[in-house]
Every structure is written in C-alpha cells, then in structure tokens.
Amino acid sequence: MSHAHEHENHGSVKSYLVGFALSVILTAIPFWMVMGGAFTKQATLIGILALAVVQIVVQLKYFLHLEFRSEEGKLNSFSFLFTGMVIALLVVLSIWIIYTADALMMR
C-alpha cells in the first residue's frame, strides 16, 4: 500500500472539525431537551434515541472513516453490523438468562 493511498484513508483537518462540530451539536440538543423540559418524557426519549443513531453514523463516518458507498466500505459495513449484532445478542441473551435464573431461584 503506497503512502498516498494510506493518506486517502485518513480524514483531513476539515473533516475532523466537521465531525467534531456535528458531535457537539448532536450532544447539545438532547441535553437541551432534557434540561429544558419542553417535551414529554416519551418525545424526549424518542428524540434522544434518534439523535443517538445519527451520532453513531457521524462517529463512524468522520472519525472511524467507515465509508458506506465503496465496495470496501460495504464489506466494512457488513463486518461492523455483524459485530453489532453479536454484541446485541450477547447483551440481550445475558440479561434474559440472568432474569430467568433469578425468577427460578425465587420459587
């Protein structure tokens, strides 16, 4: 891999600043939603979850340089999604096992 190709995989200062600005904004909005109290609890929760998903995409694109359009980016995206699925299954099934074990021990 040439030095020029390695440089292409890394972001520029401008892209890091854009990512940082978006991250700050996407963190400040949920903070304002909670502290302002202008929304119902359900609307606040939905807003926080939606902005969290956008925050994840911003982090992946601007800081981890995960491209979603190129052929290599698609492979990386599938690898990332598979890893996320394994982690989610591990957490959910662990909670289920612990809850079930607790329920059985209380009999």
Image: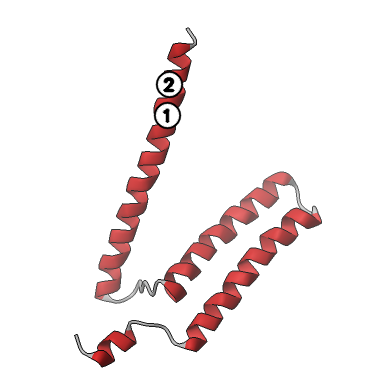
Query: Looking at this rendering, what residue extends furthest in the front direction?
Result: 3
Residue 69 x, y percent position in the rendering:
33, 75
With respect to residue 54, does 7 lie above or below?
Answer: below
Residue at position x 36%, y 74% in the image: 67
Q: Is residue 73 left or right of residue 1?
A: right
Residue at position x 33%, y 60% in the image: 80
- In the rendered image, the quadrant that contains the N terminus is bottom left
Task: Give the label on residue 100, or none.
Answer: 2
Residue at position x 38%, y 34% in the image: 93
Residue at position x 52%, y 59% in the image: 53
Closer-to-camera residue (42/63): 63
Contact between marks 2 and 1 (CB within 8 A): the answer is yes
Q: In this view, does 104 lie to the left or right of 6?
A: right
Q: Is residue 20 left or right of residue 3?
A: right
Q: How much space separates mark 2 and mark 1, taking CA atoms?
A: 6 Å
Q: What element carries label 1?
A: helix
Query: What colour scheme governs how the chains and residues are painted in the rendered image of this protein?
Result: secondary structure
Task: Give the label on residue 107, or none.
Answer: none
Q: What element carries label 2?
A: helix
The residue type indicated by label 1 comes to Trp
Residue 7 x, y percent position in the rendering:
32, 88
With respect to residue 101, does 69 lie above or below?
Answer: below
Residue 61 x, y percent position in the rendering:
43, 73
Residue 51 x, y percent position in the rendering:
59, 61
Closer-to-camera residue (37/46): 37
Task: Give the label on residue 96, or none.
Answer: 1
With respect to residue 49, does 22 lie above or below?
Answer: below
